[in-house]
Amino acid sequence: EICKFYNNKYNVQYNPETECIVTTGGSEGIDIALRTILNQGDEVLVTDPGYVAYAPLVELAGGIPSIIKLNEKDKFKLTPEILSKAITSNTKAIILNYPCNPTGAIMTKEDYSKIISILKDSGIFIIADEVYSELIYDNKFCSIASFPEIKEQCIVVNSFSKTYSMTGWRLGYLLAPDYLSKIILKIHQFAT
């Protein structure tokens, strides 16, 4: 049902048998994704303002958080200029959180289309924290994984916490290409 929801609502195709992992909330999804893709000392781009747990999760996985300052004048959106300057030869991944906690900023399909080629060319992993995807009222939510040219680089994390007011239930999920989800599942089975 999770995959059917994403497939129908957000125009993203995931196989429920091989590309979906139910997690202990969204935070576990981010944790096991990072532990899967990072080697000691790998750099992960983390936007600021952003969710307070990202940098510590990167550090716990042996990575180095590299903070990207977002600007109010850009409505806290990730611009091509900011992204291009932030990516280095040590960058392994970026964590994107749109709609954003705490700013409420969103990236529209048009906003994402401006940075897709940069992400594709860099080859970095994209961890998309989309837990607030159902709490958009003025625009239509766009999952970054809906861009086919970078879908193989995307790990989508979501939960039932915000949408259904189920924070205490600690129920989330992770969507990732088959080649990644096989490895992520190995870490998940020993982490929970």
Image (cartoon, helix red, strand yellow):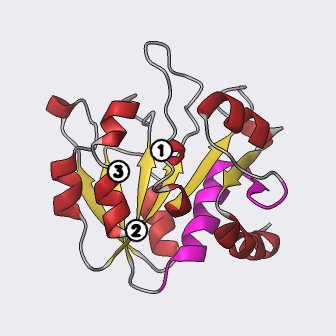
> Could you classify mark 3 by the number of other residues whose Cα lies within 10 Å: few (under 14), some (14-19), or many (20 or more)?
some
Q: Does the CB distance between marks 1 and 2 fall below 8 Å?
A: no
Which residue is under mark 2? 124
Q: Quadrant of residue 29?
A: bottom right
Residue at 61 percent across and 35 percent down: it is 11
Which residue occupies the foreground of this view, 77 or 11?
Answer: 11
Image-based side of 116 in relation to 168, left or right: left
Q: Is residue 131 above or below residue 56?
A: above
Mark 2 residue type = Ile
Which residue, as the protein is rendered here, is positioned at the far front? 149
Q: Position of residue 178 (x, y in %)?
A: 70, 66
Q: Give the magenta part as a residue range.
A: 17-39
Q: Does the CB distance between marks 1 and 3 fall below 8 Å?
A: no
Residue at 28 percent across and 59 percent down: it is 67
Mark 3 residue type = Ile
Q: Position of residue 26 (x, y in %)?
A: 64, 49
> Could you classify mark 1 by the number of other residues whose Cα lies within 10 Å: few (under 14), some (14-19), or many (20 or more)?
many
Q: Is residue 142 above or below residue 17?
A: above
Q: Position of residue 7 (x, y in %)?
A: 69, 37
Which residue is under mark 1? 144
Image-based side of 158 in relation to 84, left or right: right
Q: Is residue 154 above or below residue 96?
A: below
Which residue is under mark 3? 116
